[in-house]
Amino acid sequence: MRKSYQADIEVLKGIDIVIEPGEFFVLVGPSGCGKSTLLRMIAGLEEISSGELYIGGAYANKLKPSQRELSMVFQNYALFPHMTVEQNIAFGLHVKKLTKVEQSQRCQEAAEMLGLTPYLKRKPRELSGGQRQRVALARAIVTQDPICLMDEPLSNLDAKLRTKMRSEIRQLQRKLGITMIYVTHDQTEAMTMADRMMILNQGEVQQVGKPLDIYNHPANTFVASFIGAPPMNMVNGYIQNGNVHLPCDTTLPKIHQDLAGEFTIGIRPEHLVRATNTDEATLHATVTNVEMLGTETLINFQLTEKLQWTARWQGQHAVPLGEKVSFAIKAEDLVFFDDQTKTNTFLEGAEVI
Amino acid sequence: MTIGKKIFLYLLLILSGFIMFFPIVYAFMISFMQGGEVLQGKLIPENFTLTNYINAFEKVPLLRYLINSLVVSTVIMLGQLLLCSLAAFAFVFTKFKGKNLLFMLFISTMMIPWEATMVPNFQTVQSLGWLNSFPGLTIPFFAMAFGTFLLRQQFKTIPIELYEASQVSGISRFKFFLTVVLPISKTSLITLGIYCFLTAWNMYLWPLLVTNDEKVRTVQIGLKQMQTQEIASEWGVVMAGVMLVILPTLLLIFVGQKRLQEGLTRGAIK
């Protein structure tokens, strides 16, 4: 499957991407970045201003939504309030020219897969949020279309249920082998579910790739701060004679020999470990807040007067507030972004667009 | 609320209710009175007989009129429901250029009193040769801005995702209208239906204009006719006719009151 866009001037700019069959592809970005618009363009609910969309190799710009052989799950589920669960699931099946028997058989299958069999005769308003979500899912899979589009399907659920549905959707997708295009603003969802993901900001593609690649090698400062919670720590600094100078009067010696000039320097919170005496590159700062989460501890500290960084330590550390703590930094954990373009200096030619 | 306040409030309500309802009660009483009793200023008839009612049916073809009214009102109700719901659907679920302007124009017709358009309407109906016919009585009332407005407000509460979901699954627009929009808007449709029926039933001026044949005359005209014929001598008969005419109205109000309130507020406020 291939789809490509060029410039929907207002909201989406020059998106060119191939989504493979059977792939779980996540579109992620802050609100208003155009990810839902992109999805709706794929669904045919929104017109494509320019560029071409191919579905399964066929030119699909002019196809009606129903001709594109895809199903869609909406954020508010879009269940028909006056129909029972069964009718909701089977709604639209008759268009596919199936016999009544086939219809009810498929309906049963889908309901069983999602554990909805006991609720088939109920109306949507008699169901809980998670069950409604499942009905919406069942309605999508019952059509057996090769592509399924999901527009923030989990955002109306509470945190616990969200985690559960996340893995359920993922398992379902694997089992059925459907191509999933999933829109979310939640980077955790994107990280945990995606085979590949695309990060959008203000209608522009920031980076496309496997979640871990993106996490480890963010293409620019936006991706670095958007992916990962807490986000990557960043600060403006410069490199001279291979020494990295941070604005907090800290110099990390002999880190990069072949770089020089101004950079935005980033480091993931988990890479700021507690310094032991032998570490060369260290950072001293005053602790301003400590959050103990059980398995890990988040430590906020004042890097400069205006800038706070966060470190993530494994285990439980009762660090007193106001104490000076030393953090060790390894050269390979630092990420350098060009001061002007904000792009990752070491990612030239990699999967960047 | 203290008990005293409550008593006061209820007394006030009963009193105003009585004042409001007095004409109807009085008419009801008169409908049982014989000849001179009305002129004597009596409030309660000496004996309750149905003679007036029987007379009412005999003096004018009241049954015929009642049936005519029923047909006219029902047809107007159905026609209005059909056209208004289709128009409202178009205003909510389809995209076309100048939609809002058109809707404004449509709504602005609510500000023109119906009487102002009566002459051109009459001429149209006349040139179509619809005088003294059911089409002439009903068709001019099919497209109503109020009904369209009420239903549009209701349809707008239907999430657009429902429409998109049916588009994705390949349901046609009309099928969506039939199987989703109409069932969801049941309450509003019933409200509008009752409202239309009552307005049509109570219509006087238009039927008077376009009919002069008792075959299609409605019951309101029949009443007037009865009054003129009787020349105020037999008020009892006239009032018996009145009672028969307002009966369906009252019934509808009592049966549909809850729905009527529900629907009117739902459509307008939300």
Image (tube, coloured by chain):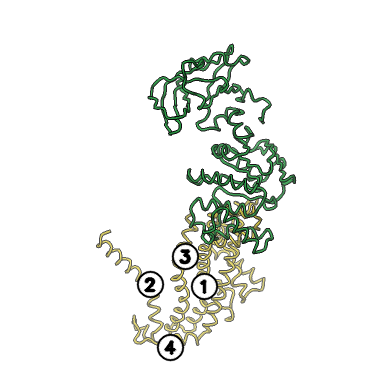
Chain colours: A green, B yellow
Asked whether residue B184 is in view, the answer is no
What amino acid is labelled 3 in the image?
Leu
Residue that badge 4 annotates: B51
Camera-side residue: B230 or A331?
A: A331
Q: Determine whether the residue tagged by mark 4 lies in a helix, strand or loop.
A: helix
Q: Determine whether the residue tagged by mark 3 lies in a helix, strand or loop.
A: helix
Residue that badge 1 annotates: B201
Foreground mark, 3 or 4, reads 3
Quarter containing the C terminus of chain A: top right
Residue that badge 2 annotates: B21
Foreground mark, 2 or 3, reads 3
Q: Determine whether the residue tagged by mark 2 lies in a helix, strand or loop.
A: helix
Same chain check for tags 3 and 1: yes
Q: Earlier in the sequence, mark 2 or mark 1?
A: 2
Residue that badge 3 annotates: B260
Query: Which residue is depicted at the point 51% across and 27% down?
Result: A270
Residue A337 percent location from the top left of the image: 59, 23
For the residues marked 2 and 1, what is the alpha-carbon distance in whole angstroms? 20 Å
Q: Earlier in the sequence, mark 1 or mark 4?
A: 4
Side of B229 relative to B91 (left or right) = left
Asked whether residue A307 is in view, the answer is yes
Q: Earlier in the sequence, mark 2 or mark 4?
A: 2
For the residues marked 2 and 3, what is the alpha-carbon distance in whole angstroms? 20 Å
Same chain check for tags 1 and 4: yes
Residue A351 percent location from the top left of the image: 66, 30
Q: Quadrant of residue A26?
A: top right
Q: Determine whether the residue tagged by mark 1 lies in a helix, strand or loop.
A: helix
What amino acid is labelled 1 in the image?
Trp
